Amino acid sequence: MSEPKKTAKKTMKDFMPPVPVVEWPANKDERKEQWEGFKTNLGTFWDQMLEMQKTTVETWKEHWNKSFPLLMDMQDNLVSALPEEIPASSMTTKDFMDKVKDFQEMTNKHMVAQAENYFNFMIEGQQKIKAMVMEAVDSIKDDTAETADKPAEKSGNK
């Protein structure tokens, strides 16, 4: 016999982690301290992520700067194995490969510069987002403190 089909809601409940209940302290100073702790942890996390991305970029650059010269050497070895002249052409094999290598080196410089610009743009954007989030946390922390100072208004008929 086949197993009964689960509904989409039941399936989602199986995969959804429980949401922790956060209780905010009644004391204004404790709430401010809790928000400050959140901000500090978030800032530390974000700084670590940015540092990891910068390390990734540096590692990529090191790898590329080692790999590209090896590619050039490999092409030199290939050219040395080819005949000196290409039949029905006024250009020698070496001249042809020199032109190819010049083009590849020009392309390499351009692509490395573009990659660096992309990585810098990405990191600057993340730093701006981090600053916005930190400002939002400060704003929430201040709003929470102000709300705690006001007496609770009762709703309903007067």
Image: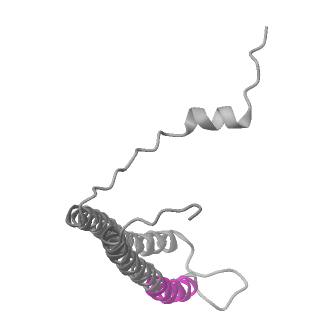
Name the spot of residue 85 as percent of width and height, x first.
Answer: 60, 82
Q: In terms of secondary structure, what is the magenta stretch mainly? A: helix
Nearest the viewer among 11 and 120 is: 11
In the rendered image, which quarter contains the C terminus? bottom right
The quadrant holding residue 58 is bottom left
Nearest the viewer among 127 and 147 is: 147
Tell me: 35 left or right of 12.
left
Residue drawn at x 32%, y 71% as measured from the top left: 141
Residue drawn at x 49%, y 90% as measured from the top left: 106
Give the residues in magenta: 94-114
Which residue extends farthest right?
1
Q: Answer whether residue 18 is magenta in the image.
A: no
Name the spot of residue 31 as percent of width and height, x first.
Answer: 27, 63
Name the spot of residue 115 as percent of width and height, x first.
Answer: 46, 80
The quadrant holding residue 64 is bottom left
Nearest the viewer among 42 and 93 is: 42
Residue drawn at x 44%, y 82% as measured from the top left: 112
Residue drawn at x 33%, y 75% as measured from the top left: 146
The quadrant holding residue 89 is bottom right
Against 90, is 59 above or below? above
Name the spot of residue 47 as percent of width and height, x first.
Answer: 28, 70
